[in-house]
Image (cartoon, helix red, strand yellow):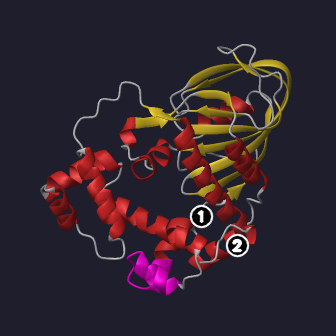
Amino acid sequence: MDAPVSSPALDLADTPFGLHSVWRTLSAANATLERFAWLGDQLAAAVWTRETREAETVYAQPGHHTLSCYIDGGYRTERQKLPGIYGAPSRLCALPGDHESRWWVRGHMHFMHLYFLPAHFTQRAVRELDQEPRELTLADRTYFEDERIAALCQTLANEDWADPEGRLRSNETAHEVLSLLLRSQGVRRPGAALKGGLAIATRRRLRDYIDAHLGEPLTLGALAEIACLSEYHLARMFRASFGQPPHAWIAAQRLERARTLLRTTDLPLAHIATACGYADASHFSHRFRDAFGAAPNAYRQALRNRGTAVPA
């Protein structure tokens, strides 16, 4: 799990993805960083405050997506291309990595940012929307309202990111936000012309086969047979349609199922390991810790302390 940072002088040179553009823009515009943390999985969150009479702020293609949620203030802040539409508590902005925007900022603002990579957003598309990752991107939306997303952002902002359990809960909350954001603010990528990749029916067949056999050994040969392709061609086309090579996709699905079982059941770790295709509980714990920076039992306990786990 990435270590939390709470200093406005944060050095971003070696971070998993660059936050330099947004960071420098806000730091140069009289904004004060209250808190910052890497939440794991290359997800980052920050809480900012800003007081100004009037100033122009420009964001230019930061390279990563940003979800902004106003905690307080923002009543006189507007985007220049949308004059007369102002911010307010719980209002949200979705800012894709390739976006450019100019803002008039006035008065008091207290807001939270969730920073994430395009891959965080689009790789959910296969499972959650039955679409290919390369078809979708984040919409550029200013001051939209979504009660559930806003409530989760408030929960995220209220967590203690310096506490290991708090970061685990924040990671879970951030993933829930991204799933909701995918459904409400996912749009077809402009000019997307899909070349290569798997036929829709083949992609679905592979997705369903993997889901049904996660507890078993899965090989490229078996997947190639399901798809009626050579192993070489399957590997290339799978990556185009799923956003990851087969082994990485399978590993991610095993971890996601394990997270779900830890969150929603009281199954012993050995049973979860078997259900998710790990050799034993020790192997499962090792893989889970590598991915999330915490042992499975610590993850389960962190969520229970927030009251999200549901007994089987």
Asked whether 272 falls inside the magenta stretch, the response is yes
Picture coordinates of residue 56 (x, y %)? Answer: 73, 18
The answer to which of 91 and 244 lies nearer the viewer is 91
Q: Which mark, residue 218?
A: none
Q: Quadrant of residue 76?
A: top right
Picture coordinates of residue 105 (x, y %)? Answer: 78, 22
* Numbered-mark total: 2
State the residue at coordinates (40%, 79%). 278
Q: Is residue 197 above or below residue 256?
A: above
* Mark 1 or mark 2: whose residue is earlier in sequence: 1
Q: Amino acid at mark 1?
A: Met
- Image check: 130 left or right of 172? left
Q: Quadrant of residue 103?
A: top right
- Which residue is denoted by mark 2 in the rendering? 304
Q: Is residue 100 above or below residue 219?
A: above
Q: Amino acid at mark 2?
A: Arg
The answer to which of 242 and 97 lies nearer the viewer is 242
Real-space CA distance between mark 1 and mark 2, rounded to the nearest whole angstrom = 19 Å
Instruction: Give the label, 1 or 2, closer to the camera.
Output: 2
Residue 6 makes an appearance in the image: no
Q: Is residue 129 above or below residue 221?
A: above
State the residue at coordinates (41%, 82%). 274
- Which residue is denoted by mark 1 in the rendering? 1
Picture coordinates of residue 25 (x, y %)? Answer: 68, 29
State the residue at coordinates (55%, 49%). 179
State the residue at coordinates (12%, 56%). 230
The answer to which of 123 and 42 lies nearer the viewer is 123
- Dot 1 surroundings within 10 Å: few (below 14), some, or many (20 or more)? some
User: Which element is circle 1 on?
Assistant: loop
Which is the main secondary structure of the residues drawn in magenta?
Answer: helix
Residue found at the far front of this picture: 312
Q: Which residues are magenta?
A: 269-285
